Image: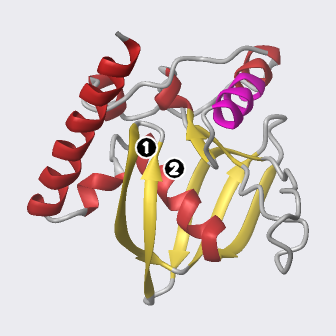
Amino acid sequence: MAIRRIYETPDPVLRQISKPVETFDDELRTLVADMFETMYDAPGIGLAAVQVGEPIRLLVIDLQEPENPEDPESPNVRDPKVFINPEVLWHSDTEVPYTEGCLSVPEQYAEVMRPDRIQARWQDEKGKAYEEEIEGLLAVCLQHEMDHLNGVLFIDHLSRLKRDMVLKKLAKWRKEQQKKAA
């Protein structure tokens, strides 16, 4: 397992359309393991393969929710999920706002409207097929990561004004990081 570089906007790799996964082998399983290690290190709750420079239809998610939501000191429980060749078959008409962030747009957050429930189909790293209705944070996260597979970032869902504000804040944050590193 290895921690891989996460590409950040405006890198053109993030705008590539990812190709379907056809071979379910050890190389794919190594990439999945690397993606989880990279995501946990970042830290994040979702990562698409294209974000680490591999434009294939693969993403990983782990919401890492608290063992006991009532106790703020409760440890988070890992529940890693792999989605290969994911598709949304159906989505609800009801959209909900959710404040999203992205490892490819570091330290920036904005409210995005997305369907609150989806019917999805995907495969795991062994090629086994699944179909399930998904709701809540997992549905939002899955839609966010699937956008990456189509070359779309969460900031593309914002108005031009909001997107420009986020990109200005990102540029300022990057300058501050460079000063700290110098």
Confirm or deny contact between disc 1 and disc 2 (CB under 8 A): yes
Q: Which residue does the numbered mark 2 point to in the structure image?
A: 145
Disc 1 to disc 2, C-alpha distance: 5 Å
Q: Which residue does the numbered mark 1 point to in the structure image?
A: 148
Looking at numbered disc 2 in the image, what kind of residue is underneath it? Glu
Image quadrant assignment for residue 40: top right
Task: Give the colour scheme shown.
Answer: secondary structure
Place of residue 3 in the rendered image (x, y in percent of width and height, measured from the top left)? 66, 18
Q: Relative to 102, is 163 on the left or the right?
A: left
Outermost residue, bottom direction?
94
Looking at numbered disc 1 in the image, what kind of residue is underneath it? His
Q: Relative to 163, is 71 on the left or the right?
A: right
Helix, strand or loop at label 1? It is helix
Place of residue 42 in the rendered image (x, y in percent of width and height, measured from the top left)? 60, 33
Membership of 84 in magenta stretch: no
Q: Which residue is at a point 66% across and 60% down the rendered structure image?
A: 121
- Which residues, given as a range, are shown in magenta? 32-41
Rendered view: 111 above or below 60: below
Place of residue 152 in the rendered image (x, y in percent of width and height, measured from the top left)? 33, 47
Q: Main secondary structure of the magenta part?
A: helix
Observer-nearest of 74 and 30: 74
